[in-house]
Amino acid sequence: MALTRIHSATTVDKPIQAAGAVLWRPGPDGPEVALIHRPRYDDWSLPKGKVDPGEHALQTAVREVFEETGQRIQLGRRLPAVSYRLVGGGSKRVRYWVGRAVPDDERWGRFSPNHEVDQLEWLAPAAALARLSRPLDAAVLTAFLAKPAVTVPIVLLRHGTAQKRSADYFDDLVRPLAAVGHTQAETMAGLLPSYGPLRVVSSPAVRCVDTVRPYARTQQVSMDIDPALSEPAHAAEPDAIARWIHALIAEVQPTVLCSHREVLDAMLVAALERSGRTPTVNGRPWSTRRAERLLGPGHGGGKLKPGCAWVLHVAPPAPGSRSTPGLIAVDRLRL
């Protein structure tokens, strides 16, 4: 649940939606966290801002961090959302992600002070916790520090809404996307870059290939077609998909793979069973009840709708260690 839940019989307006990130970069002694100073409130906080009409919260987080800090980021796992009342009435809900700074020609971007944000400081975690003005921000930062900062995304994408099965399609592999499915594919192509560059793998089914085609085209990356991700292959050898996802996690390579609900269900179950650490779910601590509600019966992912995805965040082994990559977070990416 959110860190602060709003209960009010008189509040009928929907909360203002906002998004932001815990912006961090590697430092000589571990992660360094960026805090901003807002002169209007004379406070130190995490970068965030309101969701624009028609904008997805993922895009808001990336845009607001850039506008307030001059820093381009790649998003990692979800962090707890916070909700709070506004002084003038109403409430606001802010969704947060981990945001890793991406070096550019200016090394760490170029911060330009303005009337909304006049200072930016990179601090060690303990100093950042002490500097933050609001307890809710400190709780978000604490959640960031509770798990590894460096993670690699593996996006399990269900193909978009397809045309209904009929005799028009002699082979179900050629059944195409419906019009809404193409719209979902274009929308997802605009969201996936938030996680940084991704390898693209797809089932040979036309509806899967066409779901990731817009992303592959706009990012100018090739697509690998793997028959093992098809429904017939999974039906013929159900246990094979567990070995497939375990091998992918072991590679620790950022990837988006597009397949079918039953195949993705089996992948998610296998990934959770192999996980040596209890993953967070949508930024929230693991609990059986929460996992059942989000992941479906048996944690199988049966609630994943067409065109949406599970994002697995895998922590690579520490340099020089003999540990194996570990699944530390599962987020649901909805359109």
Image (cartoon, rainbow, N blue to C red):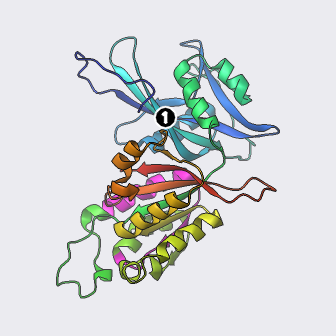
Residue drawn at x 36%, y 11% is 88
Q: Is residue 220 above or below residue 1?
A: below
Residue drawn at x 43%, y 32% is 18
**Residue 260 visible within the image:** no
Q: Is residue 297 above or below residue 100?
A: below
Relative depth, front residue between 180 and 143: 143
Query: In the displayed structure, does residue 202 sit left or right of residue 316?
Result: left
Residue positioned most to the left? 167
Q: Quadrant of residue 87?
A: top left
Q: Position of residue 25 (x, y in %)?
A: 71, 40
Q: How many marks?
A: 1
Q: Is residue 203 above or below residue 281?
A: below
**Residue 169 visible within the image:** yes
Query: In the displayed structure, does residue 271 sit left or right of residue 178?
Result: right
Q: Which residues are magenta?
A: 182-206
Q: Quadrant of residue 53?
A: top left
Quarter of the picture containing the N terminus is top left
Residue drawn at x 62%, y 32% is 69
Residue drawn at x 39%, y 43% is 290
Query: In the displayed structure, does residue 298 sit left or right of residue 109?
Result: left
Q: Position of residue 45 (x, y in %)?
A: 58, 23
* 290 in the magenta segment: no
Magenta segment, principal secondary structure? helix
* 190 in the magenta segment: yes
Q: Which residue is mark 1?
A: 80
Query: In the displayed structure, does residue 318 sit left or right of residue 304?
Result: right
Q: Position of residue 184 (x, y in %)?
A: 34, 59
Q: What secondary structure is found at the residue carrying circle 1?
A: strand
Q: Is residue 319 above or below residue 127?
A: below
Relative depth, front residue between 289 and 49: 289
Specify the amino acid type for callout 1.
Answer: Pro
Q: Position of residue 82 (x, y in %)?
A: 45, 28
